[in-house]
Image: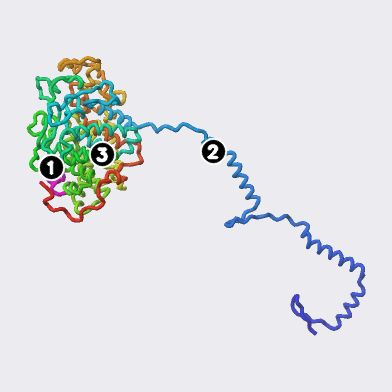
Amino acid sequence: MYSANHWGGSFEIADGAAEDDHSRNMDLDRGALSARQHHELDETQQSWLLGPPEAKKKDKYVDLGCVVVKRKLLWWALWCVVAAFVLIGLPIIIAKSIPHKKPGPPPPDQYTEALHKALLFFNAQKSGHLPKNNGIKWRGNSGLSDGSDAKDVKGGLVGGYYDAGDNIKFHFPMAFSMTLLSWSVIEYSAKYKAMGEYDHVRELIKWGTDYLLLTFNSSASTIDKLYAQVGAAKINGSRPDDHYCWNRPEDMAYPRPSLSVSSAPDLGGEVAAALAAASIVFRDNAAYSKKLSQGAATVYKFARQSGRRTPYSLRQPDIEYYYNSTSYWDEYMWSAGWMYYATGNSSYITFATDPRLPKNAKAFFSILDFSVFSWDNKLPGAQLLLSRLRMFLNPGYPYEESLAGYHNATSLNMCMYFPRFAAFNFTKGGMALFNHGRGQPLQYVVANSFIAALYADYMEAVNVPGWYCGPNFMTTNDLREFARSQVNYILGDNPKKMSYVVGFGSKYPRHVHHRGASTPHNGVKYSCTGGYKWRDSKKADPNLLAGAMVGGPDKNDGFKDSRNTFGQNEPTLVGNAGLVAALVALTNSGRGAGVTTVDKNTMFSAVPPMFPATPPPPSSWKP
C-alpha cells in the first residue's frame, strides 16, 4: 500500500521489510541508544540557545537614508570633525575675534597720484574771496573789484577762475572747463569717491558755476546780453593791462574791463552746457540743481535767438586773438544734448536730432579737424554724448537716424586716433599732433584721450567688444591703450623723460609761464613792470604751481623750460580740465564700478521713459 510523504516524494513499503527491521532493532543496546539520544538533544538545544560556537561577531550598521555605513566608521568621522574644529576652527574663531587694524587701501596708481595734483591747479587759479581751506598758501583774495563797471550786475563779477598764466577771466574756456569736469563726475563719481576727491571736485565745479550765473541775469527768463570776460590785453601793447604787467593777482592795480556781448550763440551755448551738466552733478541739492537748470534754460534761449547768431568773438579784438570761436553749430548740438539730459524736455532732443543740425555743423563731412575735441570744437564730444543716448536708452523713431549718424561719426573719430591709419601725425616719442604742431598741444591730447577712454567704457558697459575701422576690428582695449599712451607721455614716458605736470615725478618744468607762481609771496607788492625781474629770472619758481599741466613739447618732442616760451610752458584751465577727466577715466581707483551709465538712474533720471510717437512739426525747429 502507499502512504503520503510530506517531506518528499512518494515511496513503496514492502510487506517483508517489517520482520527484518524488527530483528535488527532487537539487536540494539537500549542503554547506549538512550544516552546517544540524550547527547544529541543537548547539542541541539545548545545550538538553539548559543548559536555556532566558532562564529565571529557581526558588524553593526547605521542607515542614514541615502547610504548605510558602519557605526564604527561613523563614530570615527565624527571624532575627526571634533578634532579638526578644536585644532583648526577654534584658533581661527579666536583670531578673528581679536580686533585688528583695517588694512589700508591699495597703493594708488600714477593716474590717481597725478589727479590729486591736477585738481590743485584749480585752487591756485581761483579769483575772488578765497575760502580758508583753499590749500594754496601763496594765494590770497584778488579781483575784488572785478565787474565794478558792470552796473547791471549786483556785486560785480567777483569769483571764477583766471584762465592761464595771466589774470584774464575768459568765460568761454572757463565754461567748457566746468562742463568737462561735470561730465567726468557724472560718469566716474565712484572713482572720485574711491580717491577721496568727490567733494573737492564738486566744490571746484560750484566755484565755476556760481560765477557763470553772475555773467547774465539768471533769475530772468529772457536776457539780451552776456558777459564774455573780465580783463583785457592788447597785443604788443604799451599800457598797463593783463599782459603788459607781470603781477600776482593779489597785486593787480590796472584797469580790468568787463566785456559784454549782445550776440553769443557759441558762448551762450557753452554756458548753458556747463550749467546743465552741473545741475546733474548737484541733483542731491535740489534747490541748487534747479537754479542751475533754470539759468541754463535762460542762457540757452539767448544763444538760440534768431537775431543773435553772430559769433561772440567777431570784431572783438580783446577776445578774437585769444579765444576766437570758428562756429556755433557745434555748441548748439553740445548744449542741446546737455539740456535734454538735465531737464528731460523732449524739445531739446528734437532739435539735437533734426537732420538739419548735423548738416549745418558739417558733422558728417569727414573733415579732419572736426574730429578733434577742444574748447573751440565740441562736435566729437557732442556726438559721443548723443551716442550715449542711443547706446543706453535706444529711443528709436524719430531720433534713431540722427543718433545712428552720431554714433557712426564717433566710431570714425576714434579710428583717426590710431597711428596705423595715419590721419594725424605723431612725434617720434608718440605724442599725437592733434593741432598740427602748434602751441599748447597737450590740451588737445588730454581732451581726446578722455573721450577715447570714455567711449571704450561705454562699449564695455553694453557688452560690445569693439568696432570696425574699415576692415580692421579695433577692441575697446586698443582704444584705452591709445589713451594711456598719450597720458603716459605727459607723465614722463617721453624722450625728455620728464613730466609735463608740475610737481609730479622728479623732473618737471620749474619755470612756468605764470605770474603767481613766479613772483615771491614775500609781502612785497611789485609794480606793473617791477615784476619783470621775476618773469626774466633764471631761478626756479618760488611758488610750486602743483598739478599744472604746461602747454607741452613741440612736434619734435623738444621742450624749453623757460617762462618766455609760453606756447610750451603756460598752463590753462581747459588743459587741466581735460587732464583731470582723462586721468579719472584711466585710473584703477574704483575700477569695477564702471561708468555711471550702467546705472540709468544717475544721468537719465530726468529723461522721461516714453518718447514722442510722431516727429514734431517742422516749425519747432528754427534754422
Count residues near mark 1 (Cα–Cα under 10 Å), then give few for <14, some for 14-19, many for 20+.
Answer: some
Q: Whole-Å distance between the Cαs marked 1 and 2?
A: 69 Å
Amino acid type of the residue that numbered disc 2 sits on in the rendered structure: Ile
In the rendered view of the protein, which quadrant contains the N terminus? Answer: bottom right
Front disc: 3 or 1 = 3
Q: Earlier in the sequence, mark 3 or mark 1?
A: 3
Amino acid type of the residue that numbered disc 3 sits on in the rendered structure: Ala
Count residues near mark 3 (Cα–Cα under 10 Å), then give few for <14, some for 14-19, many for 20+.
Answer: few
Q: Whole-Å distance between the Cαs marked 3 and 2?
A: 51 Å
One can see residue 367 in this view: no
Q: Position of residue 597 (x, y in %)?
A: 29, 44
Q: Position of residue 349 (x, y in %)?
A: 19, 47
Colouring scheme, one of rainbow, by chain, secondary structure, one colour: rainbow
Front disc: 3 or 2 = 3
One can see residue 445 in this view: yes
Identify which residue, 543 or 219, lies in the foreground: 219
Q: How many marks?
A: 3
Tell me the quarter of the picture where residue 216 sits. Answer: top left
Region in magenta:
352-366
Identify which residue, 456 or 271, lies in the foreground: 271
Q: Residue furthest bottom?
A: 1
Q: Earlier in the sequence, mark 1 or mark 2?
A: 2
Element type at mark 2: helix
Front disc: 1 or 2 = 1
The residue wearing badge 1 is: 304
Q: Is residue 353 magenta?
A: yes
The residue wearing badge 3 is: 287
Q: Is residue 134 magenta?
A: no
Give the vertical position of 472 relative to 530 (above or below): below
Element type at mark 3: helix
Give the vertical position of 599 relative to 245 (above or below): below
The residue wearing badge 2 is: 93
